[in-house]
Amino acid sequence: MKPIAFNDCLGWLHEGRSGYGVVLCEPFGHEALWGHKLMRALAERLASESIWVLRFNYPCAGDSVGDDTEPDRFANTLTSVHHAMAVLRERSGISDLALLGVRAGALFAMLAACGEGVAAAPQVDAIAALTPVVRGRSYMRELSLLQRGWLETALPAVRFGYRDEPCFSVLGHRYPLDLVDQIKSVDLCDRITRATLPANAALLVDTDYGDAAALSSALSSRGVEVTSLPFVEWPTTMLESTQSRLPLNAIDSVTKWVVKRAAICASGRQFRHDGMMQNTMDNRSETLCADGASECLVSVGPRQLAGILCVPAGSAAAWPKAPAVLIANTAANPRIADGRFAVSLARELARNGIVSLRIDVRGTGDSGEQAPDDQSTVPYSDQTVVDVGEAANWLAARGHQDVIAVGICSGAYAALHAAARTTSLTGTIAINLARFVWPAGLTLAEALKQRPNSAAGYLVSARDWRRWRRLVRERRDLRPILKSLGARLVVRFRLAAQDFAERLGRRSPSDTPRGVMHELARRDVRVLLIYGEFDAGIDELNHNFGPLQRAFKGWRNVGIRTIRQLDHALLGTSGRNAVIDFCVDTLTGRDSRQVEANSLPAAPGTSQAIRTASARVSEL
């Protein structure tokens, strides 16, 4: 596969050896993040059968240019599908083309095939739709219920921050009002009956509760040959990356159908490929220019990890004393992160003169030889720590003497442990770090079951009548909560004994939380811990280093910051923006606010771009 940039969109071209090609139309929002490995797996399987494939991010999505709050996203998304079809024809020389969409991507694929957004309908041989969005109003209602469910489990401070969201938001991904209204206005069955013939054939793969039956009738009425298949594997497909699995049977069925369409179109015609594609792609610069930032896809380190190097552009001159920032993956998500946090952070850093690199570690995103399936072992793995360290070495080899790793939850863990192993990392910003050390043999599923709320969160929840109602309705067992609170009382006595032993010269083992932090201190690695005020990671901190107000007292290299409205995965815009602003202010040495905990302390002999703040940070 080769990187490709066109019309402010970034994507991948998977080379084939036939005269048939497929443009993949990804889902929207969080489903695009969760469905990334499905789109890649489809592309790779089709390419293995000689089919040319182009997969890409829509404008204002993924790694493409634009912010998700921008207007006209509906029209721009539809236009990007038409651009993708033209680019695939131009780059490959194919004669026939199909569109394949998943969820909302299927809606835009259908609209594009019907000729909406262009003067004349495109020549599309076939359309494949996986669990297609047929009625936009029902789709937006489904998203609204999903977001409401998340808010009901959030703490009051997070819910309060959500009131300031600039537009409709679902798990961190934003939908401007005009986009919501235009999606709600779409009924594919109605559009198809009024449009020109959209394609010769269509494949609908859907659940038994989807709208594929109505869509099939509408397509059949226009003379389209329709094939319908059940999507039995869907319940395990569209889930968070560490929980989902590839729908191998569905991928196999779709591939066979597309190959059959290619054979029909190729009957009596021979495709000729002159070999110029390889040289043309190699000499082409695949770079995107966002506001104040220039980005390009890069191959990182000896394992050729996929990454996006983001550098200052235009009026945003690079600051020679600034550190370079390495943004680690969260869980097994692709490099853009939930709510495009990594993209937003990288571009804001570039506008302030700071270079950054966001990567896909092995087993995530576009790294590795093929799309991953089971990703449950990626977070907290030694492999991930090694990859983060090698990415830091890659930046250092390009002249960046001061490299700071930024990560959320498991990404914070990888950043912290990579800094304890490589000299290339001079600092880390660890956001909502859940664990300082991962116990041997513990699986991610077991850890998620064990994860309690924070002590502060329990106290807040106790004052929320809705939580008590849920406890009664669901008949939840309170014993784990009481056990967790009781264990915290024992910690105070144990920590006092550990502090006394360390003052006498006893060193904590390297595989313990205190041992890791002592190693970072020995290496003069600067560490900034950022937590949501009610994040459960604070209890992990308290358990190993004492109460928040006194933790790391006397440590020159460690600072702590809390943000009241910050949720664990940074899904809320208010908390996410607060983290981005604080990171930029800290990394540029600019901090005009009073602070409640230390900024990232400056290590001796390293850049003063990150300086020590003298006061404690107040709540945002």
Image: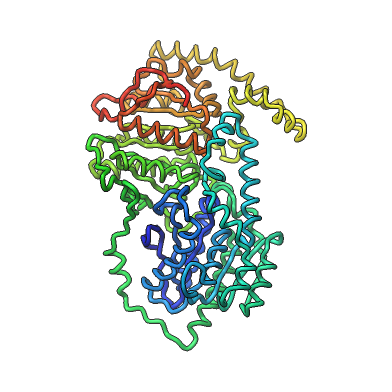
Residue 105 position within the rendered picture, expressed as x and y whole percent measured from the top left: 54, 61
Q: Do we see residue 422 in this rendering?
A: yes
For this orientation, the residue located farthest to the bottom is 268
Query: In this picture, is 390 found above or below 546?
Result: below
Quarter that holds the N terminus? bottom left
Viewer-closest of 596 and 536: 596
Residue 206 to residue 239: above or below? below
Q: Residue at x 40, y 10 (%)?
A: 504
- Measuring from the top left, give residue 611's x and y in whole percent: 30, 25
Q: Is residue 38 left or right of residue 400?
A: right
Residue at horizontal 49 percent and vertical 44 percent from the top: 339
- Front in this rendered view, residue 521 or 503: 521
Q: Position of residue 138 (x, y in %)?
A: 66, 55
Residue 295 located left or right of residue 49: left
Residue 82 vs residue 374: left or right? left
- Relative to 232, say whether 98 is above or below: below
